[in-house]
Amino acid sequence: MPNKLSQFWQELKRRKVIRTITVYAAAAFVILELVSMSEDPFGLPEWTFVLAVILLSIGFLIAIILSWIYDIHPEGGVVKTESVDKVKHEDIPKSSNSWKIASYISFMVIVGLIVLNIIPRSKRAEGTEDLEKSIAVLPFENMSNSEEYSHLGDAITDEIILELQKIKEFDRVLSRTSTMQFKENRPTIPEIADKLGVNYLIEGSIQRHMEDVSIRVQVIRAKHEDHVWGDEYDGKWEDVFSIQDEIAFKVAEELKTVLSPEEIRKIEKSPTENLEAYNLYLKGRYSWNKRTADGFLRGIDFFHQAIKVDTVYPLAYAGIADCYNLLGWHDLLPAEEVYPKAKAAAEKALRIDATLSQAHASLAYVNMLYNWDWQAAEKEFIKALELNPNYAEAHQWYSEYLAYMEKHDESIKEATRAQELDPLSLSINHNLGLVFYEARQFDLAIEKYQETLQIDPSFIVSYNYLGLAFAGEKMYNDAITNVQKAIDLTKKQSPLYIGTLGFIFASMGKKNEAKEILELLLELSQHRYIAPVSLAIIYGALGQMDQAFEWMKKGYDVRDDFMMGLKVDPRMDNLRSDPRYQDLIDRMHFPD
C-alpha cells in the first residue's frame, strides 16, 4: 500500500498536478483577498465573496483535471500526457526551472499574504480595544426616488443614534445636530473626526421602494480611514426594526463591547407594532428638527396622526411634548398655551413607558420653565440622564437648572458634557457661554460666544449675549457693537435685543438713550408680547425701583422665562437690595 501511494505521488508530480495546485492556490488566495478588500470601498453586495469562492472552487477542480490529462512542452505546446506505462524513466523530461520558480514564488506569496493579513487585523483589534469608543453617525444618504420618503435619510440617522445611545459602554455617541453639518458638504473622514473629536464614524444609505427597503452601513476607524465593518441589509419595510437592532449589535461586536441583558432588551424593544404610526412619527421628528415655528406645528400634527393609529405610542407623545416646549421657549406661542400641553403629553408618555428618557427630560423642562417646581425638575433630569447618559439636550437643560440653583461648578460641568456630545450644536455652545455669564466668569463667556459665532456668524442670539458679557467686563463700546449687530441681523424689530441695548445704555450712564428705548418697547407692547422682565431690568439699571418691580410682578404673573434667573442674572444686581426682590424669590420657592 505505501508503495502504491508513493507511485501515485510520483505520478502527480510527473503530471505537474502538485505544481498546478500550488500556483492555483496562490492565485486564488490573492483573488479572494482583493475581493474582500474591495467589498466596502466599492459597495459590493455581501454575496460577492461567496460567489468568488464558488467560482474558484469549480476552477480548481477543472485545473486539476486538465493538469492530469494535459502537459505543456517547450517544443510541442499543449499535449496529452502519456501514460506512465508508455514512458520509460529515462524519457521523463526533467523538471523545468520555470515551474520550480513559479512554485516557490507561489508559496512565498501565500505566506506573505497570510502574514500581511494577520498583522494589520491584530493591530486593528488591539487598536479598537484601546481607543475611546466615541462615535458619530453621519447623515445617511437617501437613495429613495419618491418624495414620500424624503425624510428617511435624516430619520434613519436619528434612529441609529438612539439605538447606539442605549449602549452605556460607548463613551460618547454624538447627537445629530453636529453631524448634520456634513449633510451637504462632507470633508474627508479624518477632518470630520477631528472636528467632532471622535474615533469612529458610521455612514451609510437607505433606499425604500414601496414595501422594499435597503440599508447600507459601515463603521470606519477615522484616523486612518480603516473600514472596521460594513454590511448591506435588504428586506421589507416591516423588517426595519430588526435591521436597526442588528446594526446596533454589530457595531457593539466590532468595537469589542459586551452588552448587558438590560441593554439587549432595550435595543430589541420595538417602539410600536404599527408601521404606519412609525412612519408618521419619523415625519414628525423630521419636522421638529427643522427648529422653526412651522416645523414644530407640523411635527405636532404628524405625532397626533401617529397616535390616532397607535394610541399607546410613547415616543409620539414625547414628540408632542418636545414641540410644545420649544414653541414656548422661543416665545412663538404664549407660555400658558403650550407648557400645560407639553406636561400632559410627557406624563402620558411616561404612563405608557416609564423608561423613556426623552419624556423624563421634557417633563423636567416644563417643571423648570413653567411650573417652577424645582425639586420635581431635578428628579426628572437625573432620571433622564440615568436612562440615557448620551442625551446632549438633557445635559444642556440640566446645566441651566443647576445655574438657576447657583450650583455653578456643576452647571459648567453639565454644559461641558453637552458640548462633548454635540460639539457643533449652536444652542449647546451658546448655552456654555450662558452658564459662564451667570457664574460671572465674563471672560470665559466672551470666549465661548466668540467660538459659537465662528461656527455660524449668523447666530444672532450669541451677538446679544456677547454684548452682555462685554458689559459685565465694563467694555461698553464692544458691548454696544455686538448688540447692535444682533439688531441689524434681525429682519424685524426684536424686543429682546432692543431691551439689551437699553440695559447697556442705562448701565453706562446714558439715561436719555435708555429712556428712549423704554418708550419704544412700551409702544411695541401695545401690539405684541414684550417680556415684562426685560423692561424691569432697564428700569432697575436706571434706579427706578417702583417701575422695575411693577414689571417684575407682571413677569411673575405671566411666568416670564427670565424669572428663572432671579438669583443669578447679573442684569438684576441693582434689584437685589430691595425687600421686594426677596419676596419674589420666596414666592417662587427657590431652594435655600
Image (spheres, helix red, strand yellow):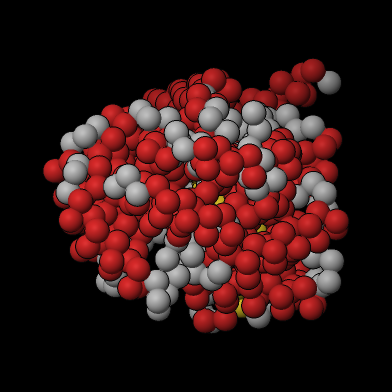
- Given residues 407 and 422, the one toward you in this image is 407
Give the left or right position of residue 109, taking residue 12 as reference. left
Give the left or right position of residue 181, taking residue 17 as reference. left
Q: Is residue 432 above or below residue 319?
A: above
Residue 316 appears at what percent x and percent y?
Answer: 72, 65
Q: Is residue 222 above or below residue 462?
A: above
Residue lying at 72% horizontally and 48% vertically, measured from the top left? 360
Residue 183 appears at what percent x and percent y?
Answer: 40, 59
Residue 192 is at least partly visible in this image = no
- Given residues 157 and 333, the one toward you in this image is 333
Residue 522 is at least partly visible in this image = yes
Q: Residue furthest left?
A: 477
Residue 397: image quadrant is: top right
Residue lying at 79% horizontally and 41% vertically, measured from the top left? 264
- Given residues 568 and 463, the one toward you in this image is 568
- Given residues 218 and 78, the one toward you in this image is 218
Residue 235: image quadrant is: bottom right
User: How many numbered marks are there?
Assistant: 0
Residue 78 appears at what percent x and percent y?
Answer: 46, 49
Q: Residue furthest top?
A: 2
Residue lying at 76% horizontally and 63% vertically, measured from the top left? 344
Residue 498 appears at what percent x and percent y?
Answer: 28, 60
Question: On the rendered image, what quadrant is the C terminus found in?
Answer: top right
Residue lying at 81% horizontally and 54% vertically, measured from the top left? 350
Question: On the rendered image, what quadrant is the N terminus found in?
Answer: top right
